Amino acid sequence: VVVPEGSEAVLGLSVRAHPPPEGCAWSTAGRGINPEGSPRFRLSPGGALVIANVTRGDSAAYRVWCVNAEGGAGADVTLVVQVPPSIVRAPDPVVVDEGGEGQLLCEARGSPLPPGSITWAR
């Protein structure tokens, strides 16, 4: 699931079982997610996990596990949060002696930030 930063992510869920599932639980990085009382996480009526106002920190692999009287089954969903590029550190004035060499450095963040996406203009 790919969503822009600040939007809502819906990690869908479709379960077929007989008897119907008694419940489903979501987790990430081995930690359970408890949407009750959370301002950002909630479960939709169909069991999908809804994350409001996603941040880059929400980019992760999520796992859902559903059980009924006959056993359990799980599935993995990866959430990718797209983050617009931003300049983290820009060069301060660089002083170079006439005829010397100067180096301008720039650090940028974003996701995705493919190679060659930073360009310089005069």
Image: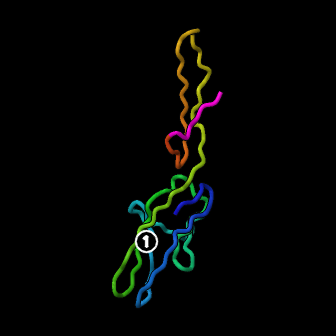
**On-image quarter of the C terminus:** top right
Color encoding of the figure: rainbow
Could you tell me residue 58's position as x and y percent?
51, 57
Q: For the residue labelled by badge 1, is the local secondary structure a helix, a strand or a loop?
A: strand
Query: Would you identify the image quadrant in which residue 20 lies?
Result: bottom left
* Residue with the most extreme bottom position: 19
What residue is shown at x 63% (from left), y 30% (from top)?
A: 121
Could you tell me residue 41's position as x and y percent?
55, 66
| Image-based side of 115 in relation to 29, left or right | right
What residue is shown at x 62% (from left), y 60% (from top)?
A: 7
* Residue with the most extreme right position: 122
Vertical position of residue 108 compared to residue 7: above or below: above
Q: Looking at the magenta stretch, what is its main secondary structure?
A: loop
| Image-based side of 32 in relation to 9, left or right | left
* Residue with the most extreme left position: 71
User: In the depicted view, which residue is nearer to us: 37 or 44?
Assistant: 44
Q: Amino acid at mark 1?
A: Val
Could you tell me residue 59's position as x and y percent?
49, 56
* Residue with the most extreme top position: 98
Residue identifier under label 1: 64
Could you tell me residue 67's position as x and y percent?
39, 81
Vertical position of residue 108 compared to residue 101: above or below: below
The part of the chain drawn in magenta is: 116-122
User: In the depicted view, which residue is nearer to us: 93 or 71?
Assistant: 93
Vertical position of residue 20 compared to residue 47: above or below: below
